[in-house]
């Protein structure tokens, strides 16, 4: 890493999640240990083995003006709500349009639109489709709408890597600023995939919890009784900026986006590689990119989705790549798994943890599984030390994609 | 019995409000969609699809482009 490389800072945060409609309400819910997972009553629920999900705490269609909402897929609605919050939080930076970029990703895209439009087409014919059907279902739609909303011209991108999409978006945004393509980039992830087909398909992959008698207790990362992930929805988006640009306008700086690391397992299309080699590689590269040592990392917001296969492999990899000392948590125990939105909201949570020096406890972890050497925060929130510390957000996706983002306290 | 011009105007006002956010009271016969109401061609398609459901009248694309004012649509639906 060159010593004079452009440094990237975070100046704005936005989120809409199963536990809150914005960052403030979401963060206080996490610190209070509240679950956003609840029984669902959609008409398809009888056809699938999973009867609960982390539905958004605030319906985005109620927040956005109606004419706007009706042209947007729900994943796009979430993205716009979170992006506008982040942009205002950053003080609506004065930046040339040619120097403003957007990287907003989704793992699945506008799947609700795809499925309902297919019904309309079959039942009523092509000419009853909304002329906005294509921009509603295309996976770059959320990025494109955020780009239009802000007038971004430096490049609008959507990195797609299943549940690593949101973290990869933030990494790509950091690279846009470091390479000189942009001064400010709005980046994160969004997902709106709570639909019978997705639930059926993930259930067919035997990936989902079926703890129907206890929805709030269903997402239980690292617990011996965990039986799969819980589907959540929402978006998390941050404003990234070159340090020079942020300092020149006197912006509040939450944290440095200090490093990013990627890898691919090349092992199995859905199963994690049991030795965690790919995950170790992503974390090691992220630390190298941030030019920090494992000991500098005091907190890890883990990917840990509550699946039997993945949770323990990840923390064993944390122990090897970073050490056993960081305070590790999985906020998915409260939000459920937002798929492509996960890296977005969890980056927001990692940054809030650094800013407020507190790690929200993982809920539902009453009996930790064997083989865990790291310190998992559960039972009560834990304080982070003062001083110059770093924190890591991990995101991994079907396909073997691994992305790790390192944030450093400002 | 066919809808009166006033009923069609009210229905159309509702549709346009739903799609564009323009108050229904501004949807009056002499208004031009493009020049007065600032409605673009894709929104016109949305309006035509909704009007089809509301009034049971098919508006083909080659006709749609000739409907420049609210009055044009009222006349088309009535005939």
Image (spheres, coloured by chain):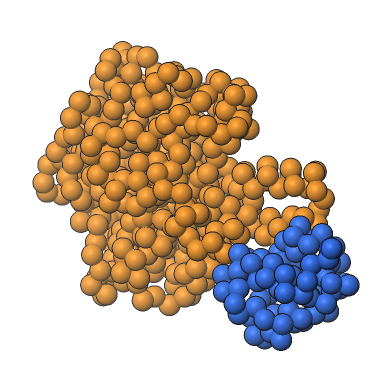
Q: Position of residue A246 (x, y in %)?
A: 28, 69
Q: Position of residue B23 (x, y in %)?
A: 57, 74
Q: Position of residue A239 (x, y in %)?
A: 36, 60
Residue A67 is left or right of residue A312, and the answer is: right
Residue at image location 72% in from the left, 70% down from the top: B7
Does residue A407 appear in the picture of this structure?
no
Residue at image location 23% in from the left, 37% down from the top: A32
Q: Name above or below for residue A83 compared with residue A36.
A: below
Task: Single out the residue that lies furthest toward the left.
Answer: A386
Between residues A408 and A235, which one lies in front from this camera angle?
Answer: A235
Residue A14 is left or right of residue A120, and the answer is: left
Residue at image location 63% in from the left, 54% down from the top: A136
Q: Name above or below for residue A308 compared with residue A12.
A: above
Residue A270 is left or right of residue A290, and the answer is: right
Q: Name above or below for residue A253 compared with residue A337.
A: below
Residue at image location 65% in from the left, 85% down from the top: B36
Between residues A84 and A326, which one lies in front from this camera angle?
Answer: A84
Picture quadrant where residue A211 is located:
top left
Count of numbered tags: 0
Between residues A33 and A369, which one lies in front from this camera angle?
Answer: A33
* Chain ID, orange in image: A
Between residues A119 and A250, which one lies in front from this camera angle?
Answer: A119
Q: Position of residue B56 (x, y in %)?
A: 82, 59
Location of the C terminus of chain A by quadrant is bottom left
* Chain ID, blue in image: B
Does residue A334 appear in the picture of this structure?
yes
Task: Single out the residue that lies furthest toward the front.
Answer: B1
Picture quadrant where residue A377 is located:
top left
């Amino acid at each position: 890493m060159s010593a004079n490389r452009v440094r990237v800072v975070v100046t704005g945060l936005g989120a809409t999640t199963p536990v809150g409609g914005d960052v403030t309400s979401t963060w206080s819910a996490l610190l209070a240990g509240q679950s956003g997972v609840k029984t669902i009553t959609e008409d398809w629920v009888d056809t699938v083995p999973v009867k609960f999900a982390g539905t958004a705490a605030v319906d985005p269609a109620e927040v956005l003006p109606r004419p706007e909402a009706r042209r947007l897929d729900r994943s796009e609605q979430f993205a716009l709500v979170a992006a506008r919050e982040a942009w205002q939080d950053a003080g609506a930076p004065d930046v040339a349009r040619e120097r403003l970029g957007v990287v907003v990703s989704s793992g699945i895209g506008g799947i609700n639109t795809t499925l309902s439009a297919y019904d309309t087409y079959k039942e009523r014919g092509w000419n009853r489709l909304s002329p906005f059907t294509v921009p509603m279902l295309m996976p770059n739609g959320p990025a494109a709408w955020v780009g239009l909303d802000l007038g971004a011209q430096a490049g609008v991108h959507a990195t797609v890597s299943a549940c690593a999409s949101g973290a990869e978006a933030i990494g790509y945004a950091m690279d846009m600023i470091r390479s000189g393509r942009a001064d400010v980039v709005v980046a994160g992830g969004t997902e709106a995939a709570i639909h019978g087909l997705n639930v059926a398909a993930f259930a067919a992959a035997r990936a989902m919890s079926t703890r129907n008698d206890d929805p709030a207790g269903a997402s239980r990362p690292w617990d011996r009784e965990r039986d799969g992930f819980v589907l959540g929805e929402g978006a998390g988006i941050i404003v990234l900026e070159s340090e020079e640009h942020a300092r020149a306008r006197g912006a509040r700086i939450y944290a440095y986006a200090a490093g990013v690391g990627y890898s691919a397992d090349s092992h199995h299309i859905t199963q994690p590689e049991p030795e965690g080699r790919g995950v170790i590689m992503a974390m090691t590269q992220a630390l190298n990119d941030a030019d920090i040592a494992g000991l500098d990392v005091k907190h890890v917001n883990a990917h840990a989705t509550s699946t039997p296969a993945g949770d323990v492999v990840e923390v064993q990899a944390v122990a090897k790549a970073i050490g056993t000392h960081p305070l590790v948590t999985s906020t998915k125990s409260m939000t459920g798994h937002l798929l492509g939105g996960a890296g977005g909201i969890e980056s927001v949570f990692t940054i809030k943890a650094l800013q407020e020096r507190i790690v929200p406890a993982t809920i539902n972890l009453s009996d930790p599984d064997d083989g865990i050497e790291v310190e998992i925060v559960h039972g009560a929130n834990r304080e982070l030390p003062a001083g110059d510390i770093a924190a890591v957000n991990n995101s991994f996706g079907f396909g073997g994609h691994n992305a790790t983002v390192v944030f450093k306290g400002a | 019995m066919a809808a009166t011009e006033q009923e069609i105007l009210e229905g159309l006002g509702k549709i346009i409000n739903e799609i564009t956010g323009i108050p229904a009271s501004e949807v009056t016969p002499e208004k031009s969609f493009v020049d007065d109401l600032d409605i673009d061609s894709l929104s016109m398609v949305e309006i035509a699809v909704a009007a089809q459901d509301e009034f049971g009248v098919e508006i083909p694309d080659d006709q749609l482009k000739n409907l420049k004012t609210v009055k044009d649509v009222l006349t088309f639906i009535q005939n």
